[in-house]
Amino acid sequence: MKNYKILKNVSLSSKVLSGYTNTSFSKKDLIKVTYCIEKNEPINITDFDKIIHYSENIFKNLNQESIDSIKVSISKELTDSSFNQSDYKPTEEDYIVLKQSLDIKQINFYEEDFVMELVSKPVYPDMKITCQLSYDFEIIETMIF
């Protein structure tokens, strides 16, 4: 198996390469990362080189400031949508509580974009939050399920 500097415990199954990487922005030291390729013919480990290069650039640019910005956007979108059919108007405190409780558990890289999987145990117990982003850090979609 090829040695990728950013990955530990690398495994390849079907069309997905997975491993773990160190981060400075997660509440735990290692987070799971996956690389998914849409390809019909058999997959070779070198097919992942381009997408792993993208992820290396993402990890270089994912600092606490950029993570905070993403978390603020997620918090506002989810909080606003949670109360959009109610008379209650979310406060800044509502946004802050969610933002501070968001924890990145996994990042899935695709050829065109990447998806962060997050949890917020105090606000959304037993639910998963996903945030799809472009490689320019623009949020494409945020979902909770």
Image (cartoon, rainbow, N blue to C red):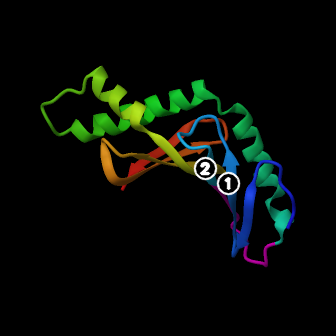
Instruction: Tell whether 61 sits left or right of 129.
Output: right
Q: Position of residue 103 (x, y in %)?
A: 48, 42
Residue located farthest toward the front when viewing the structure as drawn: 29
- The residue lying at 12 percent from left, 31 percent from top is 87
Quadrant showing the C terminus? bottom left
Q: Earlier in the sequence, mark 1 or mark 2?
A: 1
Q: Which residues are magenta?
A: 33-43
Q: Amino acid at mark 1?
A: Tyr
In the picture of the structure, the residue carrying the numbered disc 1 is 20
Instruction: Tell whether 8 sits left or right of 105.
Output: right
Depth order, front residue of 121/58: 121
Q: Is residue 98 visible?
A: yes
Residue located farthest toward the left when viewing the structure as drawn: 87
- The residue lying at 81 percent from left, 53 percent from top is 50
- The residue lying at 83 percent from left, 56 percent from top is 49
Q: Is residue 20 magenta?
A: no
In the picture of the structure, the residue carrying the numbered disc 2 is 31
Q: Amino acid at mark 2?
A: Ile
Q: Position of residue 58 (x, y in %)?
A: 70, 39
Using a 10 Å C-alpha cutoff, classify the residue at mark 2 as few (fewer than 14 neighbours), some (14 to 19) or many (20 or more).
some
Q: Position of residue 128 (x, y in %)?
A: 41, 53
Quadrant location of residue 85?
top left
Q: Is residue 35 magenta?
A: yes
Depth order, front residue of 68/114: 68
